[in-house]
Amino acid sequence: MTKTRIDALLLPLFGGVLFVGVGVFLGHSSPAGQADFLQVYADSRCIAHHHDPYLPSEFVAFYQADIGNLPPDSDPADHSLREIIVLARNLPSTLFVIAPIAALPWKWAAVLWMAIISGTFILASFTTWNIGAGSAPGLSGLLVCLLLANSELLLSSGNTAALVVSLTVIATCCLLREHSIPVAILCFAIALAVKPQDAGPIWLFFFLAGGVHRKRAIQIAAITAAIALPAVLWVSHSAPHWWPELQSNLAVGRLKGDLNNPGPTSLGARGFGMFVTLQPLFALIRDDSRSYDLCTYAVCAAPLILWLVKTLRSRFSARSAWFALASISALSMLPVYHRTNDAKLLLFAIPACALLWREQSALRWIALSLNAAAFLLTGDLFWAVVWHFTRFSPASLNAAVIIAPLILLATGVFYLCIYLRRDASDHEPGRAQSAALLTTA
């Protein structure tokens, strides 16, 4: 490694220390610490002990016998925590993947899970830095540091998005660099099985790209199916009606005022771990699901269709791939349920920004500004400071759910425009150019 790259490496190292230090502290000190993982952990144990976690009454009885008392529901904040734990909303494949960890006692499982997601997320961050450093090491280091320093909730909540984002990013980097392909395919399949709404759009890029990339996308889908099938059989043995019960739990969470409702009265759409979709923004205008869903789909339709058509019709190149991934990682957050944890897929925008920076393009400053703003405004630390000084005022909470999706939309559309402008010369880079873009130090 050159001295420039070594110096630039200090920035993501500093961000990684903040991410782990603050994340672990919050995870152990907050009443809601590791709540997202506790839900998946308890659901998986419930299935392993031949009970139905998708049926709240049966799950509560098992939880109290196996783990302990649930949080009280007298306080609104505690009620949200109780709802997170009681209402099972995860697919059988998620519970199946977590089952080996769920076999451990809670204290050991929580520590192991923190170690896994902190290690994989830092590895994913450093992988994108390493690729971006081939074009702009200092810039890439700054952006990775900014993202890591604003991702503490990812670790403290223990949300499975941490693992999914990490595995998706690592697998994608390996596939684009033609390195460790079997491992990359397995990692991608696990991510797709756990959270298809996060890994799915990235998988779709490889499928639409054609050639060897489509072949690998099909292999990923086959392994995902190989994970999902035994998972469904495993869950169906103890919970034969899991599908309608899962739909019922999801419907309860979407009721007005409940945890997953995007309306202005929701307990969970605003604040830490807030929504980054467009629905909460439109819900401020009219709090009606048909209205805000229709407006969201209308806004997202055109850029998503343009992305699909471009990817399907273009010849693959590693250079254009980063702009495609930067665009879809932002745009895919907007139309359906996603929170700030899922928005860490914006790691894909770092190599794209570095490429523009190396080109000395006038657009590089726009790219840097959008990346930095997206990392801040969909992160945790920035809004923690804002809400601390505003005392979680309704105005500041509403501002967050307006600004976050708008910056994602701007970032996605910007990289989409770059992607659409890539000409034929970008699709067949020389061997030396490809090596410069994709090799490590």
Image (spheres, rainbow, N blue to C red):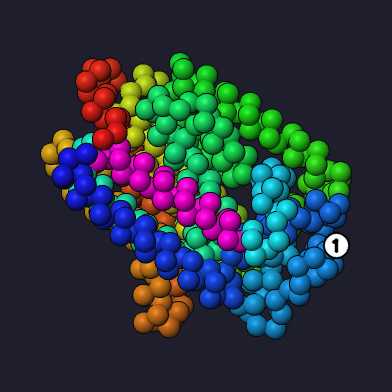
Residue 288 percent location from the top left of the image: 59, 61
- Magenta-drawn segment: 110-133
Taking the spot 30% from the left edge, 53% from the top edge, the residue there is 12
Helix, strand or loop for disc 1: helix
For this view, does 138 lie left or right of residue 14? Answer: left
Instruction: Say which quadrant the N terminus sits in.
Output: top left
Residue 54 percent location from the top left of the image: 78, 55
For this view, does 184 lie left or right of residue 15? Answer: right
Taking the spot 64% from the left edge, 72% from the top edge, the residue there is 80
Residue located beneath label 1 in the image: 58
Residue 252 percent location from the top left of the image: 72, 62
Taking the spot 36% from the left edge, 61% from the top edge, the residue there is 17
**Is there any visible trace of residue 427 in the rendered image?**
yes
Taking the spot 42% from the left edge, 31% from the top edge, the residue there is 174
In terms of image quadrants, where is residue 403?
Answer: bottom left
In terms of image quadrants, where is residue 228?
Answer: top right
Q: 430 and 413: which one is in front?
A: 430
Q: Tell me if residue 123 is in the magenta stretch.
A: yes
Q: Main secondary structure of the magenta part?
A: helix
For this view, does 316 lie left or right of residue 77? Answer: left
Q: 171 and 379: which one is in front?
A: 171
For this view, does 91 lie left or right of residue 110? Answer: right
100 is higher (above) or lower (below) than 400? above
**Is there any visible trace of residue 401 in the rendered image?**
no
Instruction: Say which quadrant the C terminus sits in.
Output: top left
Instruction: Please state which amino acid type lies under the numbered disc 1.
Output: Glu
Q: 221 and 395: which one is in front?
A: 221
